[in-house]
Amino acid sequence: MIERILTPPLGANAYLIKDEKIALVDPGGDSAFIINAVSSKIDIKSLDYIILTHTHFDHASATADLKKVSGAEVLIHEKEYEFVKTNNFSASFFGVDFPPFEADRLLRDGELINLGKLKLEVLHTPGHTPGSICLYDELERIIFTGDTAFPNGGFGRVDFPGGSAYDLVNSLKRLSELDVEVMYPGHDEPVDGAEEHLKLAFKLARMFL
């Protein structure tokens, strides 16, 4: 049901979720690559949603082209959409710009994205960016963490525009209290035992941020 796609240029993870609705979490930064990768796995016109955990270019700059080809709806937290529009879709701090995209659904904390078996709760987890989100299914005990948290106690950087150490620590505290078994991070391999990884991330963030 969940297939990881490792995307260029910086090895960000995209996740193709095949349920009653088909969703791609974070299309990455290479439009041609992700369109070919998704087309090799499904009829690309059957893609229902592109869900963005945040808008750094390595996770999001393929959004406009994938939306154009697939017709999928773009789902993004309202604060993140405001953030990326304010910055004119410019990742100038990375030396990269990317094509603007229109959001179809602005997400808020606590709402559900119903894919069928999976019902992903939107957790607003600012810190890496103002509108970063994680996607949590309490029943299935899985979470997509974007660049908020990584395996082995890793956590997102806060030194890019819009970053906040205070917010990230609070977001990691929230994640550390969840009942969750599998973590699908924005970089690195998915891991079991997610609770311990998230608790460690919160512990280390309190120490170093």
Image (cartoon, helix red, strand yellow):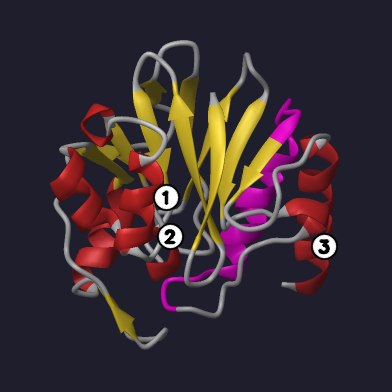
In the rendered view, does 121 fall on the left or right side of 199? left
Q: Are marks 2 and 1 in contact (CB under 8 Å)?
A: yes
> Which residue corresponds to mark 1?
26
Considering every residue shown, the one lying at the far front of the view is 40
In the rendered view, does 23 fall on the left or right side of 125? left
Question: Marks 1 and 3: which is nearer the front?
Answer: 1
Mark 2 vs mark 1, CA separation in Å: 5 Å
Q: Nearer the viewer, residue 34 or 144?
A: 34
Helix, strand or loop for disc 1: loop
Residue 202: % across, % down: 76, 53
Residue 143: % across, % down: 61, 34
Residue 154: % across, % down: 75, 61
Q: Amino acid at mark 2?
A: His
> Which residue corresponds to mark 2?
59
Q: Residue at x 48, y 67 (%)?
A: 8
Look at the picture and state if 90 lies above or below 4. Answer: below
Q: Residue at x 49, y 11 (%)?
A: 117
Q: Is residue 123 something one can see in this rendering?
A: no
Is residue 162 on the magenta stretch?
yes
> Which residue corresponds to mark 3?
204
Q: Where is the C terminus found, in terms of image quarters? A: bottom right
Going from the N terminus, do you reach mark 2 or mark 1 first?
Answer: 1
Going from the N terminus, do you reach mark 3 or mark 2 first?
Answer: 2
Q: Residue at x 85, y 41 (%)?
A: 196
Going from the N terminus, do you reach mark 1 or mark 3 first?
Answer: 1
**Which residues fall within the magenta stretch?**
161-182
Helix, strand or loop for disc 3: helix
